[in-house]
């Protein structure tokens, strides 16, 4: 297992983060602190109150996963919870199957796919287990869905493609592997293409799809990202992108590709040319610091690109050719491990066991809720729009996977009041303890 130096510390601007050496944040956690020390540690948020009851500090209320939180009550645990016109954000339920940590999620319509270190991919429908399929290839690090197919990234450096049977939807068949056996065999006799060039030589950590171009991107701990043609499973290009593991890759509008690495940098690449002449050219280093880059996401319109790092901060940039730095989102005390964007909302999951919900109105970002309840780091997120209805307009179903071996399901509204507004409504004029953005 690789050892990396990352910094886990205060997500704010005050003080230097504490340095710790630990295993790769995408695989496991080996904090020097014990769970008792972490649970007893006092937050430096000015709103901390040792006498605060769980119903005041956590939106989980009576949930058995109840964890105290230093934040103000969320929109749906406030005094307005009985108001029928209040757009509440809250927990719908939990999916628990004691077979391993949850490392990857993907959702489409009413189906949820979960990947864990048990080698199983489980399929859930309406909160119930619907199907499952397995590959003897190590833990499932990444899952994406495209055109009715499920793409999974594995620890053995391969991508596998699955599709449900038309006659029996609960039966999933493997319909492809990247690279194919034929491609590996061909590369072994071709002096211009080695097996290492075709296949990742370490675990695949992330996947991204550009459906318009028919391209799949895979990032790996081998410090490269690869470009695959989905129509024939062919590897079109291997890019030696970073000096350490690639933790995230996203493909956005106008042919731009962003990669984030444990070396602390975010790099921008541009797709140029077509067919055999297509290449991804390095544009610039967007970000470079000591803390590892652990997650990337982009808004659906490409207006913003977000980057989460191991110091608990989320940076964002405005889209377009200039890619100007927009600001930072301070909401976490430990590493940001996952990001997701939907509509005008951005979700950040962290090793501090919490999920921050941010709303974007142009460059202005405000925190709507802090969702608590997981008893372990939040490792992955997936978001889908709730079924269309008058009450469901602007409402999203959020799935969060954790190293506590559970998946939690949340309902979040874009129209919910932000935490600062709620604090002022409740007569709290001190806002220092609320997650905030700086520009």
Image (cartoon, helix red, strand yellow):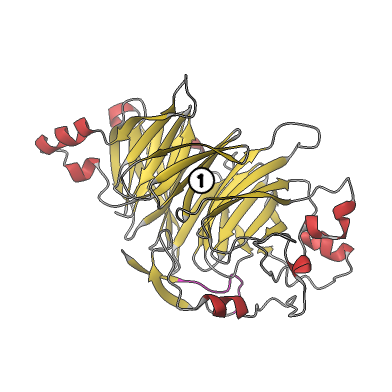
Q: In what quadrant of the picture does the C terminus appear?
A: bottom right
The answer to whether any part of residue 189 appears in the image is yes
Element assignment for label 1? strand
Q: Is residue 151 above or below residue 52?
A: above
Q: Main secondary structure of the magenta part?
A: loop
- Neighbor class of circle 1 (other Cα within 10 Å; few <14, some 14-19, many 20+) is many
For this view, does 224 lie left or right of residue 117?
A: left
Q: To which residue does mark 1 refer? A: 105
Residue 76 occupies which quadrant of the picture? bottom right
Q: How many marks?
A: 1
The spot of residue 271 in percent (x, y) is 39, 37
The spot of residue 323 in percent (x, y) is 53, 50
User: Residue at 58% of width from left, 74% of height from top?
Assistant: 10
- The part of the chain drawn in magenta is 7-14
User: Residue at 76% of width from left, 36% of height from top?
Assistant: 393
Q: Does the magenta-highlighted stretch encompass residue 9?
A: yes
The spot of residue 302 in percent (x, y) is 57, 41
Q: Does the magenta-highlighted stretch encompass residue 399?
A: no
The spot of residue 383 in percent (x, y) is 60, 43
The answer to whether any part of residue 304 appears in the image is no
| In the foreground, 398 or 239 | 398
Q: In what quadrant of the picture does the N terminus appear?
A: bottom left
């Amino acid at each position: 297992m690789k050892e990396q130096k990352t910094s886990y510390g205060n997500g704010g601007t005050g003080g230097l983060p504490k340095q710790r050496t630990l295993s790769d944040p995408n695989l496991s956690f080996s904090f020097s602190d014990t769970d008792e020390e972490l649970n007893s540690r006092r937050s430096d948020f000015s709103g901390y109150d040792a006498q605060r009851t769980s119903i005041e500090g956590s939106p989980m209320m009576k949930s058995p996963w109840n964890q105290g939180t230093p934040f103000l009550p969320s929109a749906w645990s406030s005094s307005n919870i009985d108001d029928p016109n209040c757009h509440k954000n809250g927990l719908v339920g939990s999916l628990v199957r004691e077979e391993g940590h949850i490392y990857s999620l993907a959702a489409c319509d009413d189906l949820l796919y979960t990947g864990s270190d048990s080698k199983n991919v489980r399929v859930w429908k309406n909160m119930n287990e619907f199907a499952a399929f397995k590959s003897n290839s190590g833990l499932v690090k990444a899952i994406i869905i495209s055109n009715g197919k499920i793409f999974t990234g594995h620890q053995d450096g391969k991508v596998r493609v699955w599709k449900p049977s038309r006659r029996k939807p609960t039966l999933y068949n493997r319909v492809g592997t990247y690279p194919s056996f034929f491609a590996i065999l061909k590369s072994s006799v071709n002096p211009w293409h080695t097996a290492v060039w075709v296949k990742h030589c370490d675990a695949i950590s992330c996947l991204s799809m550009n459906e318009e171009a028919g391209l799949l991107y895979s990032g790996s701990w081998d410090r490269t990202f690869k470009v695959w043609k989905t129509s024939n499973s062919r590897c079109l290009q291997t890019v030696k992108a970073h000096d350490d593991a690639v933790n995230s890759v996203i493909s956005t509008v106008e042919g731009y590709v962003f990669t984030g690495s444990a070396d602390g940098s975010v790099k921008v690449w541009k797709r140029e040319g077509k067919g055999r002449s297509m290449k991804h050219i390095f544009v610039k280093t967007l970000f470079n610091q000591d803390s590892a880059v652990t997650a990337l996401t982009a808004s659906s319109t490409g207006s913003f690109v977000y980057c989460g790092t191991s110091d608990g901060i989320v940076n964002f940039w405005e889209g377009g050719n200039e890619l100007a730095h927009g600001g930072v989102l301070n909401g976490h005390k430990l590493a940001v491990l996952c990001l997701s964007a939907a509509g005008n909302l951005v979700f950040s999951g962290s090793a501090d066991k919490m999920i921050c919900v941010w709303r974007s109105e142009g460059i202005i970002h405000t925190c709507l809720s802090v969702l608590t309840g997981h008893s372990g780091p939040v490792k992955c997120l997936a978001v889908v729009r709730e079924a269309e209805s008058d009450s469901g307009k602007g409402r999203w179903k959020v799935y969060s996977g954790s190293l506590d071996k559970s998946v939690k399901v949340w309902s979040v509204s874009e129209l919910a009041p932000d935490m600062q507004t709620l604090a002022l409504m409740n007569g709290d004029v001190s806002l220092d303890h609320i997650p905030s953005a700086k520009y």
